[in-house]
Image (cartoon, helix red, strand yellow):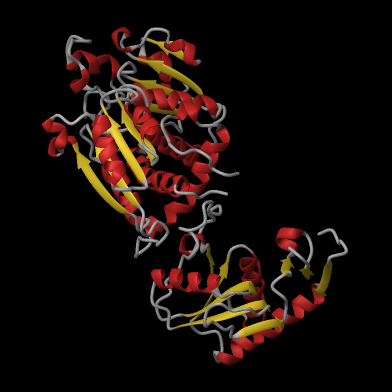
């Protein structure tokens, strides 16, 4: 099949066939990162702009490495060192970048819908690298790829997503993606961090973590996003971790071959205990990062015309 | 593959087998044995031919030589001009190419552009002592200064014809056919 999309704005807009094509393409790209010379000439002469209005280590580095391994020129713009501090609007910034003829613009923004606005304004391909609490499609794709590698399939698996669902774009993209691929997604978190009507996305919701992780094949822990919390949603970090920290004890409720995921950065001892995060027999956290580069290479390749 | 009036079979199963047997002996003769030889098949037809050559060479020499798989898509020279890129296949070369004699294997040698891409890819994997090219069919019409070291059959063809190599592994039968007007 051909990949017809101009932009990657969210998992919600992707079909199962499109997700499968992206994952298959990413599989082929995994090998390049294991070579001594980690570069292929495929996107020579293409320009990719990483426009990051929010802090990022993993995603921005991952996109930059993905572009460079395909021989594209990658340029990073972070809001704090750009004309944004002089008061330039997103629309003006986008039009100016468009005038310099890049091929792909990767954007992360604190406002939900910012990538969609950009996509409607400029002719370049837009990749959403996280917009507010809305979607983070490349994270969900790399999560699905990681699960698929460890479990051999997605369909029929029970995936528990635990923590601050309300503020989590990772959760939203994963709910869309995993449900489409046939997994059963269950959520748990404090009632103050569970959005209203979230069950309408076809998920089961619990307030007790133990209920959600029982018999789970995959447990995905979310970071407590202290930067997004103006009001206090739980009494203290210590109390939160007493109820919602994945540790040696409660992980026994999950299936024996459970894998533990986390989109990073992890708050050790808050949502995940260090011995679980660092346990190679269940933690696939660094594997997720590894897959991230391949998924982003696949998207850059497909958006610039690949995949027939 | 279904036979229709515009196709002509130019080589059958036995013909292909005999060509490959001869090429296997020629590879060993030219390189004075199998020392330092590795095979790399170009996706997809070349991979099956390389597997067959590997078996023939190990039958003769009673030892196995390494076999790698190369997908040249990412090295194509038309990738930035064509709007739709082909689907990627996996590259699998699990051994060092440094100081090895690499026998590159493909089904049809035509413009030479695939081989150019394959050589660029191989050099990204290391520094082979030598690269040699084995093809089942050489149909002419080169656009680059490239020639094969081992040829199953020279098949002069016109640009309006297509040469198709069917192999049991992927098409259910072994044959080489010329199709007209494609």
- Quadrant for the N terminus of chain A, please: top right
The part of the image, by quadrant, that contains residue A163 is top left
Q: In this orientation, does residue A226 appear?
A: yes
Residue A47 at x, y = what percent?
33, 51
Residue B166 at x, y = what percent?
74, 65
Looking at the picture, tell me which residue is in the foreground, A181 or B176.
B176
Q: Which residue is rendered at x = 46% and y = 11% of the image?
A: A199
The part of the image, by quadrant, that contains residue B176 is bottom right
| Relative height, residue B167 to residue A265 (above, below) | below
How many numbered badges does the structure rendering display?
0
Residue B67 at x, y = what percent?
55, 70
Looking at the picture, tell me which residue is in the foreground, A24 or A146.
A24
- Judged left or right of residue A180, residue B139 is right
Looking at the picture, tell me which residue is in the foreground, A201 or A7.
A7
Pick out the residue farthest to the right: B5
Residue B109 at x, y = what percent?
62, 75
């Amino acid at each position: 099949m051909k990949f017809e999309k101009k932009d990657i704005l969210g998992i919600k807009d992707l079909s199962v066939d499109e997700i499968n094509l992206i994952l298959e393409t990413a599989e082929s790209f995994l090998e390049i990162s294991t070579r001594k010379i980690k570069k292929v000439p495929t996107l020579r002469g293409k320009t990719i702009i990483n426009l990051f209005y929010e802090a990022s280590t993993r995603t921005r580095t991952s996109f930059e490495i993905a572009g460079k391994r395909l021989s594209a020129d990658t340029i990073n713009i972070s809001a704090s060192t750009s004309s944004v501090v002089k008061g330039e609007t997103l629309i003006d910034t986008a039009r100016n970048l468009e005038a310099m003829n890049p091929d792909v613009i990767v954007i992360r923004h604190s406002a939900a819908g910012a990538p969609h606005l950009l996509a409607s304004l400029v002719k370049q391909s837009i990749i959403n690298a996280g917009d507010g609490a809305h979607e983070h499609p490349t994270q969900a794709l790399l999560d699905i790829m990681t699960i698929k590698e460890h479990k051999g399939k997605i369909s029929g698996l029970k995936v528990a997503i635990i923590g601050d669902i309300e503020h989590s774009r990772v959760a939203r993209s994963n709910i869309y993606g995993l449900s489409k691929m046939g997994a059963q997604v269950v959520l748990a978190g404090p009632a103050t961090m569970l959005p209203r009507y979230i069950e309408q996305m076809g998920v089961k919701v619990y307030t007790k973590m133990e209920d959600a992780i029982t018999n789970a094949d995959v447990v995905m822990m979310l970071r407590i996003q202290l930067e997004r919390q103006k009001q206090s949603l739980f009494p203290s970090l210590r109390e939160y971790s007493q109820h919602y920290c994945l540790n040696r004890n409660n992980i026994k409720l999950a299936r024996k071959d459970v894998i533990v995921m986390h989109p990073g950065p992890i708050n050790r001892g808050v949502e995940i205990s260090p011995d679980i995060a660092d346990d190679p027999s269940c933690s696939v956290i660094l594997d997720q990062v590894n897959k991230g580069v391949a998924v982003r290479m696949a998207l850059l390749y497909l958006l610039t015309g690949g995949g027939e | 593959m279904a036979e229709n009036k515009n196709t002509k079979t130019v080589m059958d199963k036995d013909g292909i087998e005999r060509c490959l047997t001869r090429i296997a002996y020629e590879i060993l003769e030219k390189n004075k044995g199998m020392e330092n030889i590795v095979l790399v098949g170009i996706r997809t037809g070349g991979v099956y031919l390389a597997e067959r050559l590997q078996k023939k060479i190990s039958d003769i020499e009673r030892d196995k030589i390494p076999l790698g798989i190369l997908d040249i898509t990412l090295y194509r020279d038309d990738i930035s001009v064509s709007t739709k890129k082909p689907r990627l296949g996996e590259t699998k070369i699990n051994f060092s190419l440094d100081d090895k004699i690499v026998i590159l294997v493909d089904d049809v040698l035509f413009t030479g552009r695939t081989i150019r891409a394959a050589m660029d890819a191989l050099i990204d994997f290391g520094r082979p002592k030598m690269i040699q090219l084995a093809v089942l069919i050489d149909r002419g019409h080169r656009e680059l200064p490239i020639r094969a070291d081992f040829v199953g059959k020279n098949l002069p063809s016109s640009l309006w014809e297509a040469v198709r190599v069917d192999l049991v592994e992927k098409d259910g039968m072994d044959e080489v056919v010329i199709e007209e007007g494609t």
